[in-house]
Image (cartoon, rainbow, N blue to C red):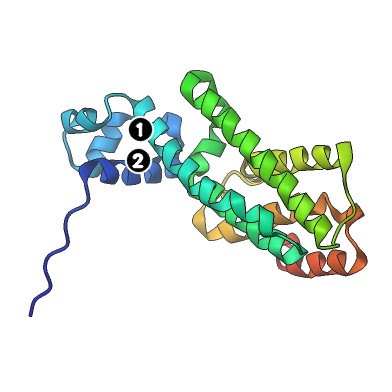
């Protein structure tokens, strides 16, 4: 018996998927609604019916990003060891990669989109809270001894690394940094450097384990 034909994806969702791919590939400032329509083989009127302005596309993609982030951040509470932290940070960096246009063009986007500015400030606060939970979990697990104002400073700096790591990679190697084949190494370096902020506070075994986890990436 033949399987029933799969239902076509809703046009609005398909528009978002293609827009995200184009934004990630070319950078948001370099992608027009005309290009998006052409890539989708739809009329500009059809695109505008679903998303009347380019900012509407950006805000819809940010909503998707926020939902994905909300699924990852709570896992910080269960971190107890360096390997837990390494995996959790990799998940965050992979999400940054999936929405890299946001981080690649962040300052420009914020300057043009007041709604995005407000929402991204909330995203940063949520990340800082999660970093605090990460540090508290590592402390409960005996991997680090860190607390008070120093802990708050480290948590904020880890968020800075997470937020601007791809920008650093791009400046370091503009021709290759944002190409998919180089993503794994770039994300690994980012996760390592975020955790490297804890090296002075880690116990000897955790420090050694972190170095072994990162060895494949920091050599590149």
Quarter residue 159 falls in: top right
> Residue reaching furthest bottom?
1
Residue 28 lies, in percent from the top left, at 44, 33
- Specify few, some or many for label 1: CA neighbours under 10 Å numbering under 14, 14-19, or 20 or more: many
Q: Earlier in the sequence, mark 2 or mark 1?
A: 2
Quarter residue 20 falls in: top left
- Specify few, some or many for label 2: CA neighbours under 10 Å numbering under 14, 14-19, or 20 or more: many
Residue 117 lies, in percent from the top left, at 54, 24
How many labels were placed on the picture?
2
The CA span between labels 2 and 1 is 8 Å
Q: Which residue is mark 1?
A: 57
Instruction: State left or right for residue 1 relative to residue 189.
Output: left
Quarter residue 121 falls in: top right
Whether tag 2 and tag 1 are in contact, CB under 8 A, the answer is yes
Q: Would residue 36 be seen by someone viewing this image from the given angle?
A: yes
Residue shown at the point (12%, 73%) measured from the top left: 3
**Front one among 115 and 215:** 115
Residue 64 lies, in percent from the top left, at 42, 42
Q: Which mark is residue 219?
A: none
Residue shown at the point (64%, 47%) measured from the top left: 173
Q: Is residue 56 above or below residue 160?
A: above
Residue 91 lies, in percent from the top left, at 58, 56
């Amino acid at each position: 018996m033949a399987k029933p034909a799969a239902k076509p994806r809703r046009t609005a969702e398909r528009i978002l998927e293609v827009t995200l791919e184009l934004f990630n590939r070319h950078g948001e400032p370099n992608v027009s609604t005309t290009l998006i329509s052409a890539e989708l083989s739809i009329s500009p009127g059809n695109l505008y019916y679903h998303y009347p302005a380019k900012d509407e596309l950006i805000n819809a993609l940010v909503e998707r990003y926020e939902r994905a982030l909300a699924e990852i951040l709570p896992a910080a509470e269960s971190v107890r060891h360096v390997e837990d932290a390494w995996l959790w940070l990799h998940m965050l960096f992979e999400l940054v990669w999936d929405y890299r246009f946001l981080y690649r063009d962040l300052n420009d986007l914020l300057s043009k989109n007041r709604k995005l500015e407000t929402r991204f400030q909330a995203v940063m606060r949520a990340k800082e809270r999660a970093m605090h939970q990460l540090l508290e979990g590592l402390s409960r697990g005996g991997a680090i001894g860190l607390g008070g104002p120093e802990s708050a400073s480290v948590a904020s700096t880890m968020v800075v690394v997470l937020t601007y790591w791809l920008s650093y990679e791009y400046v370091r190697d503009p021709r290759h940094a944002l190409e998919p084949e180089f993503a794994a190494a770039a994300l690994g370096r980012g996760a390592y450097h975020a955790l490297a902020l804890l090296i002075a506070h880690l116990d000897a075994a955790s420090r050694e384990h972190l170095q072994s986890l990162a060895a494949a990436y920091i050599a590149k």
